[in-house]
Amino acid sequence: MYLHLGADTVVRTDTILGIFDLDTTTVQKHSRNYLNLAEKEGRVVNVSPFELPKSFVVCDEGERNVIYLSQLSSGTLLGRLEVLV
């Protein structure tokens, strides 16, 4: 199955490690550091370049994790995921 993250981007549901709300998780220093490091390593994909991202999805794509920034809320993405299951 696939999950639509917005802006013509889909990911396989079996690769999803977590769906996180940007507002609540980036309060923690560790989360900010993780996202900053991933961005420096080129592992962040912004699927909504024209809108402010509300959530991020961490996917296991082979040798490294890829982080997708989405304009959709984590609640919306989780709701879509529940419909698929």
Image (cartoon, helix red, strand yellow):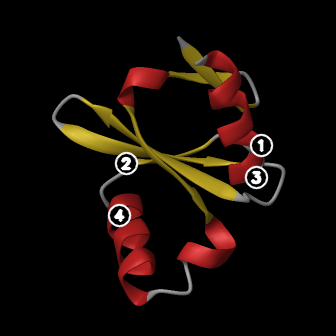
Q: CA distance from mark 2 to mark 1?
A: 23 Å
Assign a secondary structure to mark 2. Answer: loop
Residue bearing the label numbered 4: 40
In this rendering, the answer to whether 80 lies above or below 84 is below
Q: Amino acid at mark 1?
A: Thr
State if disc 1 and disc 2 touch (CB < 8 Å): no
Q: What residue is at 21 percent from the left and 28 percent from the top?
A: 62
Residue at (61% x, 23% y) in the render: 3
- At mark 4, the secondary structure is helix
Instruction: Name which residue type carries label 3.
Output: Ser
Give the foreground label among 4 and 2: 2
Q: Position of residue 59 (x, y in %)?
A: 39, 38
Residue 41 in the image: state x and y as whole percent: 30, 56
Cα gap from disc 4 to disc 1, whole angstroms: 28 Å
Q: Nearer the viewer, mark 3 or mark 2?
A: 3
Q: Which residue is mark 1?
A: 76
Marks 3 and 2, how far apart in space? 20 Å
